[in-house]
Image: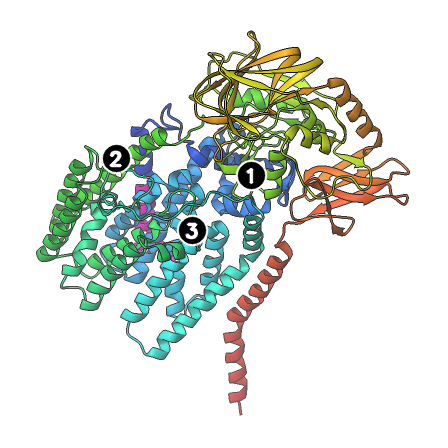
């Protein structure tokens, strides 16, 4: 059997070397930091633990047929939400499918392996691109080092490491540059289009930035390479066609994602502020970390040849100036407001504001390869490049981001790179030169990875990986599960903001960039809590809302010991059950309608339930020394850090609930009550309504405020369990007799002679239709009128944009087929016409 040509090429082992070097370096850095899975420190910081691991856990369930829902509808989160936008945002990378081969309880390890694989593939893709731009025969090993330096750039190891879907953009940039190169030379039009589709489906956000960067590379290549103006225009037209067809093929995913963003609760917006230039210079050096500065670190193995390019006389003058000029223009564009917005699709990011940094890193690596591909840099070039690096290091000195390890690592790497390039130019000790260059790259990158691992744990929220707590919680959910007869909520004492995705159940908790506006506002009106300014809604432990949303079982677990503010808690895992109506109930005609809520969540709950069940007593708030609290406004008291007593009176047999959304501290009913945590800090955090226990007559709630905040005048609600039981019995009597759910809808069978409005206990998000018509809304829930002898209701869900996206994808596919077969058809027609 003959070996395929691609494997006989020296590019293949160099590509493999780039990937292996990258993966080994990342693992070494994580091991030095004693991070998971090499040590006790969790790596699940910020959205990695709060979003990405939970969504990958749900993907595992989908792949193994254990999920509640399907590709269109997710029944586990937010009482029912659209899943396709989340799939297209977090899980559409083909590498995400790797989680399916791991055990369910090793989901954290699965996501880590996916991260390693993506980083290694990015190195391999950049290596292949570099040798496609210029073969550099005999220097393929240097391209492997540069490919690894790209995949190990500061942006990758410091930011994308805990945003794994961004790593698809790291892969996309070299692949899109490769597609542009094929378009320029009129080769592989179908494969180039499919690469564009792959990039945009995998992660549209970073693919957008990668496409801009690839367009810049293509323009430079068109300007530098020989050819007529007509040939350049044709190459540009082919590239535009490739991009348009590729994006068109991705539209069945892209359009639902875009519209999902349009229907989402508004996130946090901030004004762009450029980074200080000393900080920008510092982030080029090893062992630095900062959230609001571009992480351009590449290692001196790449930076030295890149900086030497302008002084390298063996490289044509145009290339010596155009590539460094492009790097400078892109670097400046990151610091200017209008171009910053262009890079980020005209929306300033909520978090890290320099998410396009990987494109700048890629351009620097291309400049470095341009410097070594024709000939190794001579003494003049090395001295010039070394001088530029020393100036960068000096410019970084005023930055507070520089650490005690930065300059020693930089100096060692610079010496190693200088010696390596000097040795390789002499033609002697090539193995030593390669070892020095690889060692410099791996050593600096591993140190930077370890430093970033440690700093993230200090500066960001973190979450424990799967362990005994999650296992017990998941077991309790599985034993109590009765879906779709009733929902099982995994608990208010959450481990992450997406607990239902991790441990199962059908709760209200949900955190996504696509959290629907109607979901957030409905739960807000009912007394729900949130974090992330409304994008992360929390479970609401309340018997009235449990009745409304058919939560028949609720799991209670100890407070998460991994969260630093929690006190030790040795309570066992328990399950409370409640008699609730079915998932579909029937309300009187003319009730409900548009969600126009009042200020009091207690009254809002009654309105949605359809019965009065609360007494709202007058309250008095006094500080520890007995001084009455002052009013912040007409509806709330003002509180400062300290202890307060909230007094009220409740009827006999009442259950007491507290609503203090802007209080950060604890609340306790009476002297023997268990302290309950409140984590309000509006507008970022909102504390949920809390159950405090039974109370009758004059009650006293002890509040301990740790920050400035407010307490509503109507902060106390006294629930009458008897009235609630009567309301539930009425809803059960007229509710559905049988409910069937699927991954795309609900079917309910109703009692004979039903009249009124059938209400599905799910938020009326965009995409619901019932009996072939757009669904109505009953105070924010899905609703449809029933009567005239109807005994069934069929409601289906289709994400907005799916039909239009599918049509656009079909049109793009037709265009791609025409691109693939039209040249052959034209050639055949010409041959026929040429026959005598």
Taking depth in this image into account, of 137 and 726 the one nearest to the observer is 726
Above/below status of 293 relative to 639: below
Tell me which residue sits at (50%, 52%) in the image. 201
Query: Mark 1 or mark 2: which comes first in sequence?
Result: 1
Tell me which residue sits at (26%, 45%) in the image. 297
Range shown magenta: 1-22
Q: Position of residue 144 (x, y in %)?
A: 28, 49
**Disc 2 designates what residue?**
447
| Secondary element type, mark 3 | helix
Above/below status of 792 relative to 641: below
Q: For the view shown, which residue lies furthest in the top direction?
A: 672
**Is residue 19 part of the magenta span, yes or no?**
yes
**Disc 3 designates what residue?**
206
Position of residue 435 in the picture relative to residue 717 (left or right): left
- For residue 311, which quarter of the picture? bottom left
**Is residue 528 part of the magenta span, yes or no?**
no
Q: Look at the image and tell me whether residue 558 can be seen.
A: no
Tell me which residue sits at (73%, 38%) in the image. 760
Q: Position of residue 637 (x, y in %)?
A: 52, 25
The answer for how far apart the CA atoms under marks 1 and 2 are is 33 Å
Above/below status of 15 relative to 160: below
Query: Mark 1 or mark 3: which comes first in sequence?
Result: 1
**Disc 1 designates what residue?**
59
């Amino acid at each position: 059997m003959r070996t395929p040509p691609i494997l006989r090429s020296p590019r293949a082992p160099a590509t493999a070397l780039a990937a292996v070097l990258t993966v080994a370096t990342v693992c070494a850095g994580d091991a030095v930091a004693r991070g998971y899975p090499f040590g006790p420190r969790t790596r699940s910081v910020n959205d990695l633990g709060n979003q990405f691991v939970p969504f990958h856990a749900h993907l595992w369930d989908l792949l193994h047929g254990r999920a509640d829902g399907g590709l269109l509808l997710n029944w586990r989160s937010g009482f029912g939400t659209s899943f396709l936008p989340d799939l297209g945002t977090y899980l559409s990378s083909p590498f995400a499918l790797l989680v399916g081969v791991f055990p369910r309880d090793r989901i954290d390890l699965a996501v880590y392996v996916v991260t390693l694989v993506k980083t290694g593939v990015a190195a391999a893709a950049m290596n292949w691109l570099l040798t496609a731009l210029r073969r550099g025969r005999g220097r393929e090993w240097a391209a492997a080092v540069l490919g690894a330096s790209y995949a190990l750039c500061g942006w990758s190891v410091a930011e994308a490491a805990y945003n794994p879907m961004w790593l698809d953009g790291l892969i996309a940039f070299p692949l899109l540059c490769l597609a542009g190169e094929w378009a320029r030379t009129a080769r592989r039009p179908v494969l180039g289009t499919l690469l564009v589709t792959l990039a945009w489906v995998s992660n549209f956000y970073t693919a957008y930035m990668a496409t801009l960067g690839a367009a810049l590379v293509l323009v430079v290549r068109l300007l530098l390479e020989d050819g007529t103006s007509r040939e350049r225009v044709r190459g540009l037209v082919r590239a535009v066609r490739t991009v348009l067809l590729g994006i068109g093929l991705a539209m069945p995913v892209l359009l639902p994602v875009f519209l999902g963003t349009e229907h989402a609760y508004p996130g946090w917006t901030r004004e762009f502020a450029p980074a200080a230039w000393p900080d920008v210079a510092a982030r080029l050096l090893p062992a630095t970390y900062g959230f609001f500065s571009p992480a351009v670190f590449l290692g001196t193995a790449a930076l030295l040849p890149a900086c030497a390019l302008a002084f390298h006389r063996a490289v044509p003058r145009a290339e010596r100036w155009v590539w460094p000029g492009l790097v400078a223009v892109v670097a400046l564009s990151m610091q200017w407001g209008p171009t910053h917005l262009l890079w980020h699709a005209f929306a300033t990011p909520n978090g890290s504001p320099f998410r396009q940094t990987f494109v700048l890193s890629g351009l620097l690596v291309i400049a470095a390869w341009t410097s070594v591909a024709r000939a190794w840099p001579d003494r003049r070039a090395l001295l010039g490049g070394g001088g530029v690096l020393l100036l960068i290091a000096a410019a970084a000195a005023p930055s507070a981001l520089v650490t005690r390890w930065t300059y020693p690592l930089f100096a060692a790497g610079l010496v190693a790179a200088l010696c390596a390039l000097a040795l390789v130019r002499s033609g002697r000790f090539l193995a030593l030169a390669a070892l020095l260059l690889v060692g410099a790259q791996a050593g600096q990158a591993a140190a930077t990875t370890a430093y970033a691992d440690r700093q993230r744990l200090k500066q960001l929220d973190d979450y424990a990986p799967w362990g005994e707590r999650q296992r017990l919680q998941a077991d309790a959910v599985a034993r109590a599960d009765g879906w779709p007869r009733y929902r099982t909520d995994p608990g208010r004492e959450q481990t992450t903001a997406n607990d239902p995705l991790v441990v199962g159940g059908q709760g209200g908790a949900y955190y996504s960039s696509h959290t629907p506006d109607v979901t957030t506002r409905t739960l807000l009106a009912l007394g729900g809590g949130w974090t992330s300014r409304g994008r992360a809604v929390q479970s609401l432990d309340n018997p009235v809302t449990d009745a409304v949303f058919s939560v028949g079982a609720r799991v209670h677990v100890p407070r998460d010991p991994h969260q630093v503010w929690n006190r030790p808690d040795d309570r066992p895992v328990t399950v409370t059950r409640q008699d609730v109506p079915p998932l579909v109930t029937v309300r009187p005609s003319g009730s409900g309608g548009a969600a126009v809520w009042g200020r009091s969540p207690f009254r809002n709950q009654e309105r949605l339930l359809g019965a009065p069940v609360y007494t709202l007593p007058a309250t008095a708030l006094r500080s520890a020394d007995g001084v009455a609290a002052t009013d912040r406004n007409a509806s709330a008291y003002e509180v400062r850090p300290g202890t307060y007593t909230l007094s009220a009176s409740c009827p006999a047999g009442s259950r007491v609930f507290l609503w203090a959304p802007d209080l950060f501290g604890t609340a306790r009913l009476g002297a023997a009550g268990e302290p309950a945590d409140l984590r309000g800090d509006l507008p970022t955090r909102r504390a949920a309504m809390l159950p405090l226990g039974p109370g009758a007559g004059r009650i006293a709630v002890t509040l301990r405020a740790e920050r400035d905040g407010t307490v509503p005048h109507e902060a106390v609600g006294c629930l009458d369990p008897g009235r609630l039981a009567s309301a539930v019995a009425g809803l059960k009597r007229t509710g559905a007799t049988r409910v069937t759910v699927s991954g795309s809808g609900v079917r309910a069978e109703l009692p004979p002679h039903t009249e009124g409005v059938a209400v599905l206990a799910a938020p009326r998000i965009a995409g619901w239709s019932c009996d072939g018509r757009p669904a109505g809304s009953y105070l924010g829930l899905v609703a449809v009128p029933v009567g005239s002898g109807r005994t069934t209701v069929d409601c289906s869900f289709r994400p907005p944009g799916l039909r239009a996206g599918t049509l656009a994808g079909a049109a793009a596919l037709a265009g791609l087929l025409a691109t693939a077969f039209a040249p052959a058809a034209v050639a055949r027609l010409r041959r026929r016409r040429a026959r005598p």
